[in-house]
Amino acid sequence: MIDVNAEIGKLDWSREPQGLYEPIGYTLAAGGKRVRPQLALLATKLFGGNEEDVLPAALALEVFHNFTLLHDDVMDKAQVRRGRPTVHVKWNENTAILSGDQMMIEAYKLLSRVPEKKLAKTLRLFNQMATEICEGQQYDVDFESREDVTIPEYMEMIRLKTSVLLATALQIGAYIAGATKEQQEAVYGYGIHVGLAFQIQDDLLDCYGDEATFGKAIGGDIAENKKTYLWLVAAQQGAAAELAMRNETKAQRFERVMAIYNRLGVKNAALEEIKSQTAQALDCLTSLPQNEYTDQLRALARKLEERSK
């Protein structure tokens, strides 16, 4: 399989003005799992396609994903990403916003290199994904000021904000390889359920993770009063009033909310939902060609499930 990191390393960010492009290079050089481009390439191989045909879309997906992180960090006032200062901390908010905008443009420039006969539908899939991510982000913002968010509403929000990017990466790879509509829907479904599991894992790790391995500060969701899966499980058990913001330091709030979570056993509830979503993801693979690439998708789902334990 094509080395995604090597291909990303070939992208040239030495252009002028450096104030615009240097933060892009900084962001992409931070690494990450490169799950999205790898999924696009994997889906292409699964259906016997040519990796070179899907590579532009795979790179576009990774650049676009990192663009969303750049803006997310500004909105969330996050200080650390992948163990390094976020762009708005290292430079400033204006730089993060503008460099993020340019990253989105660069993603579309990469996407335009997809083989012409596959470009129109690939672009439609990509645009639908981009719209849904913005919708999910807005719901996430809206939920911060609501105390009546339900678990189904939350699951829809994270489907939009997180899952559709993974699912679309798989669908684009499958489509470019010539997969049938039903096969595309199956890999898309796998991506949706893996994404839901992944986001609930992030909610869990934000409270119970190790900052050194998590790659960002622990407790950010609690500090921002985000309605995470853990928050909602606790609220369902009558703790919404206890979880409300108070006049306290971030450290005090984190300690207080974690005590509530521990008392109500929300960690186990989250682990059970992760297990359920992973099982549903694996079920989506049963109708697909069974080969080494299907096995890799199974292994990925199980590896992501283990990330929270």
Image: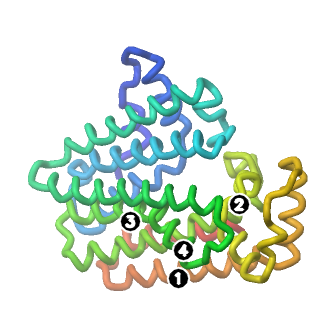
Q: Residue at x 87, y 50 (%)?
A: 251
Check disc 2 and report the residue beneath it. Answer: 205
On the image, the x and y values in percent for residue 84 come to 66, 35
Residue 115 vs residue 145, the one in the foreground: 145
The outermost residue toward the left is 117
Q: Pick whichever of labels 2 and 4 is earlier in the sequence.
A: 4
Q: Position of residue 273 (x, y in %)?
A: 62, 79
Q: Nearer the viewer, mark 4 or mark 1?
A: 4
Can the viewer see residue 275 in this picture?
yes
Q: CA distance from mark 2 to mark 4?
A: 21 Å
Give the distance between the C-alpha atoms of the residues marked 4 and 1, in whole angstroms.
Answer: 21 Å
At horizontal 36% and vertical 38% (from top left) the residue drawn is 7
In the picture, measured across the screen, residue 133 lies left or right of residue 211, that is: left
Q: Which label lies toward us, 4 or 3?
A: 4
Q: Which residue is mark 3?
A: 167
* Mark 4 element type: helix
Indicate the quadrant where residue 107 lies.
top left
Q: Is residue 213 above or below residue 291?
A: above
Callout 1: helix, strand or loop? helix
Residue 154: horizontal and vertical position, in percent? Answer: 57, 71
Identity of the amino acid at label 3? Ala
Instruction: Name the residue located 43 percent from the left edge and 24 percent from the top edge.
Output: 21
Instruction: Please give the label number shown on residue 153.
Output: 4
The amino acid type of the residue labelled 1 equals Ala
Asked if residue 243 lies left or right of residue 30, the reply is: right
Q: Nearer the viewer, mark 2 or mark 4?
A: 4
Please tell me whether mark 3 sits on a helix, a strand or a loop: helix
Q: Earlier in the sequence, mark 3 or mark 1?
A: 3
Residue identifier under label 1: 279
How busy is the neighbourhood of tag 2: few (under 14 within 10 Å), some, or many (20 plus)?
many
